[in-house]
Structure formats: C-alpha cells, structure tokens
Image (spheres, rainbow, N blue to C red):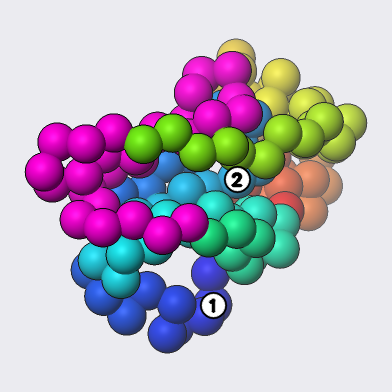
Amino acid sequence: MDDSDVHISSLRSVCFSPEGLYLATVADDRLLRIWALELKTPIAFAPMTNGLCCTFFPHGGVIATGTRDGHVQFWTAPRVLSSLKHLCRKALRSFLTTYQVLALPIPKKMKEFLTYRTF
C-alpha cells in the first residue's frame, strides 16, 4: 500500500479476507478500511469510534469490529468470485510451502506470483 498518508494515526488491527483478496484495517483515525489487494487502495470505508480489532467471517461477506469500550459491530464485506488465477494459487499454496514453490522448475514470474510477491 503506497499511500503514506492513508494511516497517519496508529494502526490497531489488520485481517485478510478468507479468499485472500481483501484486507481490512482499523486505525485510530476512526475508520475501518477495506482494501482490494490487487488495487493496493481502499475500496470502502466505515466510521467507527474507539476501534480496536477486526476480523472477517470465515465464509466471507461480513466483517466484525470490536471497540475499546466492548462494543461489536458487523459490516457487510465485499463478496467476489475469485479469479481462476487466484484459485489456482490458493489451491497450490494449501499443500506447498514457500520453499517448495521456490524449488519448482518454473519461470521466475510464476514463482513470484505463487509466493505472493506479485499480484
């Protein structure tokens, strides 16, 4: 994420969506941000006060946030159909470690994609 002024306040929580395409962040600037990793930019914002943590529902579609005063809020999260490219990477990475992927006799660009160095 190359926007240096996006989180100028303290970042409190970060979580990945189950399909690995989104990232949710909570910061002291009173915002929940949902990032599209391929775009490297926030695609949605939600106001929150005293934000402390966030997590995606394991099956997607919902983000739960917690506050320092004990409240929980639920937010609608983006639901997408993963690209075939992403599904292939996810399937392969479910049984191969990064070191095993790097040892494969495949092109460098493919290794970078499979080890999440590029999108």
- Sort mark 1 into few (<14), some (14-19) or many (20+) by Cα contacts within 10 Å: few
* Residue 82 badge: none
101 or 10, nearer to the observer = 10
* 68 to the left or right of 31: left
Name the secondary structure under disc 2.
Answer: strand
Rendered image quadrant of residue 86: top right
Rendered image quadrant of residue 4: bottom left
Callout 2 amino acid: Tyr
Residue under pointer 1: 2
Name the secondary structure under disc 1.
Answer: loop
Residue, far left? 69
Residue under pointer 2: 22
Please provide percent x and percent y for residue 12: 24, 55
* 14 to the left or right of 9: right
Q: Write down the region rendered in magenta.
A: 46-72
Residue, far bottom? 5
Q: Residue at x 50, y 38 (%)?
A: 75
Q: Residue at x 65, y 54 (%)?
A: 36
Name above or below for residue 44 compared with residue 87. Answer: below
- Sort mark 2 into few (<14), some (14-19) or many (20+) by Cα contacts within 10 Å: many
The reply to whether residue 17 is visible in this rendering is: no
